């Protein structure tokens, strides 16, 4: 398939965005590298959005973060959408937001205290009156935005959570990392890049151009994109392609 049929990153990214593609087979440390780079960027004062196209890939990222940072809600959360959810997973944004709202409501010195109290009052009244629903949504958006603005890393599935209106509006990040990119669609990458246009100046895509042990073939778009960037990297320092067989063997 010709590369012209794909929405390649250089067509949807703004000028000046640096792109790195890291290729490696199974167990070459792609996810470990993704989190290590995110950690390095965070030490430089940058914020990071990390995405994975599949649930398995997302669980790998979450596990790697738990290994490095534990379940530290002051540092990272697993973003699960704008809806007012009732998740019991301590890693999720919904769970952490509920905890923060309770804390803010009890802290009169916090700028979000009154919003949090109003939100809890609306919830306690059952929110049966449709006229109250818009106010509840507004309060939720204000409080959720405050939490997102405090975070260093956000992990999420793609494409839907990654282009959730709340995340697009409230989380300002510097680098976009997509792990297991070979299992996703380039159209989804394009959606994320366009939704967050103007925020980030670096992109790291990690994947494999080889079939896995289970016989799963990589997405043809990722292979074509890797080949395309390999050619571009010869004459443009903004683009890099790493071979993890030699760079980061586990």
Image: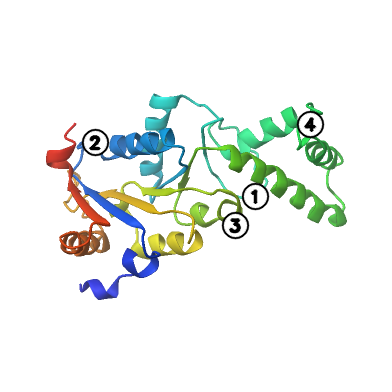
Query: What is the crowding at mark 2: few (fewer than 14 residues within 10 Å), some, or many (at least 20)?
Result: some
Q: In this view, does 193 lie above or below 70?
A: below
Kindly identify the residue that appears in the image at 49 percent across and 55 percent down: 199
Residue 35, horizontal then vertical, whole percent: 35, 36
Residue 245, horizontal then vertical, whole percent: 13, 41
Q: In this figure, which residue is indicated by the disc labeled 3? A: 165
Which numbered tag is attached to residue 34?
A: none
Q: Please, what secondary structure does the residue beneath circle 2 have?
A: loop
Query: What is the crowding at mark 3: few (fewer than 14 residues within 10 Å), some, or many (at least 20)?
Result: few
Which residue appears farthest toward the left when viewing the image? 246
Q: How far apart are marks 3 and 4 (CA)?
A: 25 Å
Residue 183, horizontal then vertical, whole percent: 31, 53
Of callouts 4 and 1, the N-terminal one: 1
Q: Nearer the viewer, mark 3 or mark 1?
A: 3
Of callouts 2 and 1, the N-terminal one: 2
Q: Please, what secondary structure does the residue beneath circle 1 have?
A: loop
- The quadrant in which the C terminus is found is top left
Of callouts 2 and 4, the N-terminal one: 2
Q: Along the horizontal axis of the image, is 131 left or right of 47?
A: right
Q: How far apart are marks 2 and 4 (CA)?
A: 43 Å
Q: In this figure, which residue is indicated by the disc labeled 4? A: 105
Q: Please, what secondary structure does the residue beneath circle 4 have?
A: helix
Which numbered tag is attached to residue 29?
A: 2
Q: Do the residues under discs 2 and 3 have CB atoms within 8 angstroms?
A: no
Q: How far apart are marks 2 and 1 (CA)?
A: 34 Å
Kindly identify the residue that appears in the image at 79 percent across and 49 percent down: 136
Kindly identify the residue that appears in the image at 67 percent across and 30 percent down: 99
Of callouts 3 and 1, the N-terminal one: 1
Q: How far apart are marks 2 and 3 (CA)?
A: 32 Å
Work out whether residue 130 or residue 193 is closer to the camera in this orientation and state it. Answer: 193
């Amino acid at each position: 398939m010709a590369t012209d049929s794909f929405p390649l990153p250089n067509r949807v990214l703004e000028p000046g965005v640096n792109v790195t593609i890291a290729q490696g087979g199974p167990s070459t440390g792609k996810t470990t590298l993704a989190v290590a780079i995110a950690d390095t960027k965070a030490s430089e004062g940058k914020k990071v959005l990390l995405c994975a196209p599949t649930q398995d890939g997302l669980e790998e990222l979450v596990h790697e973060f738990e290994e490095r940072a534990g379940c530290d809600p002051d540092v990272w959360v697993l973003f699960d959408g704008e809806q007012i959810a009732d998740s019991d997973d301590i890693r999720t944004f919904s769970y952490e937001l509920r905890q923060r709202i309770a804390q803010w409501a009890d802290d009169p010195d916090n700028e979000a205290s009154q919003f949090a109290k109003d939100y809890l009052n609306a919830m306690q009244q059952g929110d049966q009156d449709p006229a109250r629903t818009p106010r509840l949504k507004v309060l939720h958006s204000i409080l959720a935005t405050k939490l997102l603005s405090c975070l260093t890393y956000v992990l999420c599935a793609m494409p839907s959570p990654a282009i959730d209106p709340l995340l697009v509006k409230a989380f300002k990040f510097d680098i976009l990392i997509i792990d297991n990119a070979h299992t996703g669609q380039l159209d989804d990458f394009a959606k994320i890049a366009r939704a967050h246009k103007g925020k980030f100046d670096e992109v790291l895509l990690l994947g494999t151009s080889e079939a896995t042990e289970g016989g799963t073939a990589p997405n043809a778009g990722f292979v074509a994109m890797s080949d395309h960037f390999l050619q571009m990297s010869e004459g443009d320092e903004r683009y890099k392609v790493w071979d993890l067989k030699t760079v980061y063997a586990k």
